[in-house]
Amino acid sequence: MRRPRWRSAGGALLRVIAVWAVSTVAMLVLAGALPDFRLQSADGDSATRTAVTAALGAGAFGLLGALVWPLLVRTLLLVPALVLGLLVFALNGSLLLVALWLIPDGRGAASPETAVVVAAVMSAVSSATGAALAVGDDDAYRRRLARLALRRRASVVQDPAGAPPGTVFLQLDGVGHDVLVDALAGPDPLMPTVAGWAGATHSLTPWRTDWSSQTGASQLGILHGTNHDVPAFRWYEKETGEVVVSNRPTSAAELQRRAMARTGSGGLLSVDGASRGNLFSGGAAQLALVLSVAARRGRYNRSRAGYFAYFSDPANATRTAASFVVEVCREIGQSLRARFREDGPRVKRGGLYPFVRAFATVVERDVVVAAVIGDMLVGRTAIYADLVAYDEVAHHSGPESRDARLVLRRLDRSLALIAKIAPHAPRPYRIVLLSDHGQSAGETFAGRYGLTLEDLVRAGCGLPVSRRARRSPTGAEARNTARAALHRPEEQPEETTRRARRAAEPIVLASGNLGLVSLPSIPGRATREQIDRHNPALLSTLAEHPGIGFVLVRSEEHGAVVLGPRGGAHHLDTGRIVGEDPLAPFGPGAADAVRRTDGFPHVADIMINSACDPETGEVHAFEEQIGSHGGLGGPQSGAFLLWPEELTPPVGEGTELVGAERIHRVFRRWLGEGSGPGVPVGGEPRSSTEKAQATSSTEEAPATGGIRPGVDEIRSQGATSEAFSPADGAAQDKNR
């Protein structure tokens, strides 16, 4: 929805008036503090008269600055920089003296040296006020980002006119397919920018995630072509005794190393690519806020450079800092309102959470968007960026909550900024919008049943159970990303895990509504028979609990077996079902997803999926989240892909798009397709003939190669330069 011109003009006028008022107050304060600066006649004036004099002086100074200063700077361009720097203060002071001279009746006066001081303070105050008032002005913000990038564009790209179009992959973390459809519906859609694309220039395709429906598994598969052996967000590896956590920098680096070793490829972004705000690099040489390189030390870790480059501009810093404070206050207000209204379900939202939320929804968003705009203006071939704002808020407020919907509206504004930059880039761009998973709502397992999953496992093993349910660590992506941005040490494994390891007790971990139980006392993967010998009541305790949907174990006799309530069982290796099928409530693809995970080397001894209400899609997270993802059940497995219609369809008609690895192959095919039009921000839908030609190819191209001819030449034109940050990790491959 385009902002009316009268509103833009009105906003600009209000900002001018506000800057004028603040400058007037500053001039009054300086007149009272400096003996050689006066705004009154020799006989003295009333307070009202003095205020009017200050307003006239401030207005005259501001007007002279706007009209005369650009001419003076242009005239003095040939003056050496050092001399010009000294002249600036004198010239600014001279403008103030002229402004005071213009005040009627000679009420304004200052000595030359005092005029220099007053002018410097007045300029600083007016600049800071103007920047603060422009916090919500997206057009001004976009123009500023464009200027920052264009200053360095000439040194990066020599004008790749006629080059194939670039591709921007924008990931809206945690936004499910159904949530997006709802946000695009109606005459006044929640996301007007995206609604303008859908059905006109883009097509919407749902895709289904793997069993581990979380960013670590999805993004590793999308960027590096494999998420093999990623059974959950966090898991325990018996051979090392370590807990792997997807959003911990050292774990992300190791997962990326394993994926590259398995595929023998650098990743989706290996050729002239940029990775922004992601867990993994995708093989890109240009990195900013990428967690897999955040643990490095020394000159090869430049992922944090994006922060410093962005905040080096005072206007950016002012905008983002003000928005950060507003977001912290907004979260506190929303949390208090939910508590007073006794909304349910709820989780605790105190402590550092308001600041973590503000980091995800403001700081990371602004830095990532600025980096993407810079990448487009220097003409990079492939850009992949993750915007985590919605996912973070939905975890604590709920995926359908008003809080989360407001975040979607603000994300749409960020997408509009990026889309408006596309026509000014040195090459055409195609924007692909996608999500890595959805979210399922529901009361937490502990809130519903009064005990944690760890308590239930300990009870099944005959071990003491705590009287009070303990909080489970959350799997939200933003917390460790914020720690990495602040150069804070990684969070260590949970105390309960360390205690269990020492005592050889069960290690219980949670990934949304997916639970993992490892038995350190049994070497290798424990079988059903071994578990029954050591803890005869454990499996039945889990399978028969009303909050548990199904349990996966491996039997020495029957292979992979899924256990459910009332003695139900699904033998995955043979397809034999005993009693009620425990996987039936989770859809037709559940068996394939669980069977694939069962083949992973680091699958837990016992994999547990919470129950799912077949009518509402609600699940019970084993973490402190009322909007969760990580397992099966409800909308969490339903992600989306919004793609430009000049590209070939991701799959053939009537074929379901399943798995992050499949998305990787589709993206590689798209990067390899021939030239086409750039990203249309608006316009009419194409003709039926053109659409028929686009949909005539339904077979997926091989995943090998996949890069257009001629891109290597573009890459050689300075792919290691950076618009908003220095070249980050150009030698990353040899240092993994």
Image (cartoon, rainbow, N blue to C red):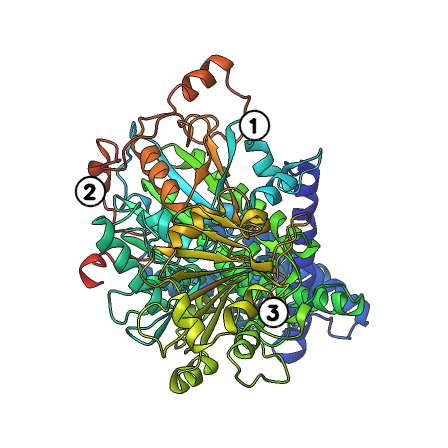
Residue type at tag 2: Ser
Amino acid type of disc 1?
Gly
Q: Amino acid at mark 3?
A: Pro
Residue that badge 2 annotates: 716
Check disc 1 and report the residue beneath it. Answer: 199
Q: Position of residue 125 (x, y in %)?
A: 58, 66
The residue located at (28%, 73%) in the rendering is 239
Q: Secondary structure at mark 1?
A: loop
Residue 453 lies, with reference to residue 678, above or below; the image says below
Q: Is residue 322 left or right of residue 574?
A: right
Image spot of residue 39 (x, y percent)? 69, 70
Give the tally of numbered discs: 3
Are the residues at dot 3 and dot 1 in contact (C-beta closer than 8 Å)?
no
Q: Residue at x 52, y 43 (%)?
A: 415
Q: CA distance from mark 2 to mark 3?
A: 44 Å
Labelled disc at residue 354: 3
- Is residue 492 positioned above or below 396 on the image? below
Q: Position of residue 242 (x, y in %)?
A: 34, 75
Q: Nearer the viewer, mark 2 or mark 1?
A: 1
User: Is 548 in front, or is 363?
Assistant: 548
Secondary structure found at label 3: helix
The quarter of the displayed image where residue 491 is located: bottom left
- Of 677 and 236, nearer the camera is 236
Q: Identify the mark nearer the N-term, 2 or 3.
A: 3
Q: Mark 3 packing: few (<14 Cα in 10 Å), some, or many (20+)?
A: many
Corner quadrant of residue 425: top left
Residue 677 or residue 656, whichever sits in front = 656
Report, in whole angstroms, how far the alpha carbon at label 2 lies from the one at label 1.
Answer: 37 Å
Disc on the earlier residue, 3 or 1? 1
Answer above or below: position of 700 versus 599.
above
Q: Is residue 72 visible?
A: no
